[in-house]
Image (cartoon, coloured by chain):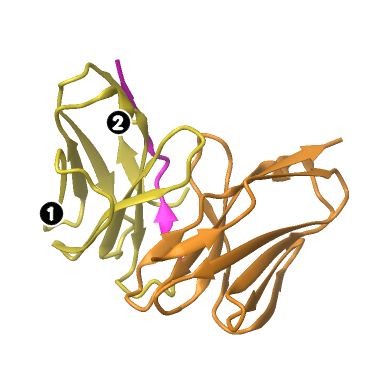
Amino acid sequence: DSGVTQTPKHLITATGQRVTLRCSPRSGDLSVYWYQQSLDQGLQFLIQYYNGEERAKGNILERFSAQQFPDLHSELNLSSLELGDSALYFCASSPGTDLNTEAFFGQGTRLTVV
Amino acid sequence: GQNIDQPTEMTATEGAIVQINCTYQTSGFNGLFWYQQHAGEAPTFLSYNVLDGLEEKGRFSSFLSRSKGYSYLLLKELQMKDSASYLCAVTDSNYQLIWGAGTKLIIKP
């Protein structure tokens, strides 16, 4: 158990819909990262938050947004869903912005868009 | 641009040794990670290198040459449970993690 909790584990929804994925980081970790992993693909970095503020942006679509709340949990919002958005979405956390420490991953949310 | 290259897939035999290579071109360098990921599961940390040389941890070792932009992960005494993808990731000058696409390792009896 990495200490990072993601909910829900599985999500099936229709095209055009909007969903929210939730992540609770390890206790004490201030940084949260979101990744997308499509079938048999590598990890694609989406966005990073540190202590409530956006820190870095990767290949995140405009239809996607995220935020980190005062209690440090984070949510990833995906809207106007398309079939190609079907993927595993991972959240990871680390103590700070200095990535010379390992990041710990949650078990992921498997999103299926039908 | 920033780039990390790993072989897409490798096959090895149970009990043998396998070396997975990773080459990188990034804006600065602040360390290199290796992660293991079983299909459909979360990546888990294996090793971290920031200085040149070999880091050994049980059956797994990781090597780094910063001047060559090169690392490898060495797995000894392979077991069936080692069948997984192995991800190389580099932290750049902004401490952003740049991920390789991963190497799928298939272990045969």
Q: Is residue B56 magenta?
A: no
Amino acid at circle 1? Phe
Q: Is residue A55 left or right of residue A88?
A: left
Q: Is residue A45 left or right of residue B80?
A: left
Chain B: its colour in the image is: orange
The residue shown at (15%, 31%) is A79
Q: Secondary structure at mark 2?
A: helix
The residue shown at (30%, 31%) is A85
The residue shown at (39%, 75%) is B27
Q: Is residue A63 visible?
A: yes
Amino acid at circle 2? Asp
Q: Is residue A110 visible?
A: no
Location of the N terminus of chain B (image quadrant): bottom left
Label 1 sits on residue:
A69
Which chain is the one coloured yellow?
A
Can you tell which quarter of the image residue B80 is in? top right
Q: Which mark is residue A85?
A: 2
Q: Is residue B100 left or right of residue A82?
A: right
Q: Chain letter of disc 1?
A: A
Q: Is residue A108 magenta?
A: yes
Q: Chain letter of disc 2?
A: A
Q: Is residue A63 left or right of residue A83?
A: left
Q: Tell me where residue B49 appears, x and y as whole percent.
A: 58, 75
Q: Tell me where residue B20 appears, x and y as whole percent.
A: 70, 58
Comparing B36 with B4, the one in front is B4
Location of the C terminus of chain B (image quadrant): top right
User: What range is drawn magenta here?
Assistant: A102-114
Q: Rounded to the nearest whole Å, what is the CA distance between mark 1 and mark 2? A: 25 Å
Labels 1 and 2 touching (C-beta < 8 A): no
Q: Earlier in the sequence, mark 1 or mark 2?
A: 1
Q: Nearer the viewer, mark 1 or mark 2?
A: 2
